[in-house]
């Protein structure tokens, strides 16, 4: 099959991540129709050349989309939207879900769409808003190889795609990513708070660590956010908490015990009632709650309203 490089796209879900991802596709010259439940969020793409639809069904039908991309809040939202657009999907078209959902939900959607001669690819991403804006997202695709080859170039407009296995394995790879991210954020918070409490300059400690084996993107980005006490969302607590719960489900399904995963899950569960929209580096706040009188730096917290 020829790669789908000039086919129109219906992009469903123009949120924090969806907007810059859609913008990358528009900048690459793709014809794109956008839809979001809040119409105003999608309409901002019109000035960049996107068509804007009132409903998800309209987005698929009006664009005669051969490729449909969903970037929605969770698996329930993805399932509801895909069931809604199902009658409008063309046979042989490709639905790419780039949301973070349960592996089992991705497998169920693959089975559903397969019955209607529609290909399904689960292609969750990592890299946050910064990566989406720069077009450097890590894209983990679970797909049949034939379907993947058709959209590999398209996915490349948003980041660095890699097929990791069949349908459903993209979500599994993303959960592995989120486990490492969530756990490392917590370790960075503990290291910086320990440095502060022990009398060292935590900013200098972070800089020193960046020259050794502890260097990581988490230490670079989230470590600085913690020092600045800036918790405006790149990724959000509610998203990380959802991912941690999905990791637990995947572990149960695979029959493995992940003790550190449980500890990290509890941290994000504790943050959900108070800071659901904060950046997931707000794990520092949960750590400080466990350590009364200990605080990283003296700046005021910057949190979403």
Image: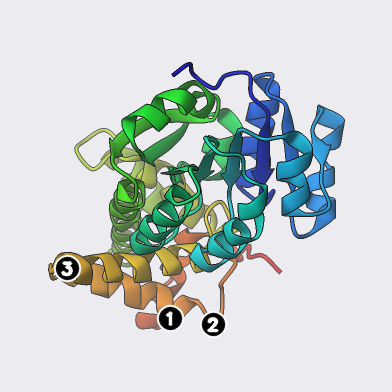
Name the residue tied to disc 3. Answer: 258
Name the residue tied to disc 2. Answer: 273
How far apart are labels 2 and 1 at the CA level?
7 Å
Q: Residues within 10 Å of mark 3 (few under 14, many from 20)?
A: few
Depicted 156 relative to depicted 289: above or below:
above
Indicate the quadrant where residue 26 lies: top right
Q: Secondary structure at mark 1?
A: helix
Whether residue 162 is visible: yes
Of tags 3 and 2, the one toward the viewer is 3
How far apart are labels 3 and 2 at the CA level?
25 Å
Rendering coords of residue 198 (x, y %): 27, 64
Circle nearer the N terminus (1, 3): 3
Q: Secondary structure at mark 3?
A: loop
Rendering coords of residue 2 (x, y %): 48, 16
| Colour scheme in use | rainbow
The one nearer the camera, 178 or 32, is 32
Name the residue tied to disc 1. Answer: 270
Q: Decide: marks 2, 1 in contact (CB < 8 A)?
A: yes
Residue farthest along the top direction in this orientation: 2
How far apart are labels 1 and 3 at the CA level?
19 Å
Q: Residues within 10 Å of mark 1 (few under 14, many from 20)?
A: some
Q: Quadrant of the N terminus?
A: top left
The one nearer the camera, 210 or 275, is 275
The one nearer the camera, 143 or 178, is 143
Of tags 1 and 3, the one toward the viewer is 3
Indicate the quadrant where residue 175 lies: bottom left
């Amino acid at each position: 099959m020829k790669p789908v490089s000039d086919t129109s796209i219906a992009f469903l879900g123009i949120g924090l991540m969806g907007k810059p991802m859609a913008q990358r596709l528009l900048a690459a010259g793709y014809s794109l129709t956008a839809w979001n439940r809040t119409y105003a969020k999608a309409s901002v793409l019109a000035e960049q050349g996107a068509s804007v639809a009132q409903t998800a069904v309209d987005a698929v039908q009006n664009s005669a989309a051969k490729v449909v991309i969903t970037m929605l809040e969770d698996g329930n939202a993805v399932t509801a939207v895909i069931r809604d657009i199902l009658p409008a999907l063309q046979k042989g078209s490709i639905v790419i879900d780039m949301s973070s959902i349960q592996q089992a939900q991705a497998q169920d959607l693959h089975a559903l769409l397969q019955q209607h001669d529609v290909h399904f690819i689960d292609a969750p991403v990592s890299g946050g808003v910064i990566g989406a804006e720069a077009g450097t997202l890590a894209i983990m695709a679970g797909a049949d190889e034939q379907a993947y080859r058709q959209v590999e170039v398209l996915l490349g407009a948003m980041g660095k795609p890699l097929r990791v296995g069949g349908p459903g394995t993209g979500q599994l790879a993303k959960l592995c990513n989120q486990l490492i991210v969530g756990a490392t954020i917590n370790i960075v918070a503990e290291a910086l708070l320990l440095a502060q409490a022990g009398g060292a300059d935590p900013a200098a400690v972070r800089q020193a660590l960046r020259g050794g084996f502890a260097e990581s993107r988490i230490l670079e980005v989230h470590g600085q956010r913690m020092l600045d006490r800036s918790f405006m969302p790149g990724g959000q607590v509610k998203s990380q908490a959802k991912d941690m719960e999905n990791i637990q489900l995947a572990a149960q399904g695979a029959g493995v015990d992940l003790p550190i995963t449980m500890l990290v899950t509890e941290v994000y569960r504790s943050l959900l009632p108070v800071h659901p929209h904060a950046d997931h580096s707000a794990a520092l706040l949960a750590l400080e709650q466990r350590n009364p009188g200990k605080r990283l730096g003296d700046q005021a917290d910057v949190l979403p309203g």
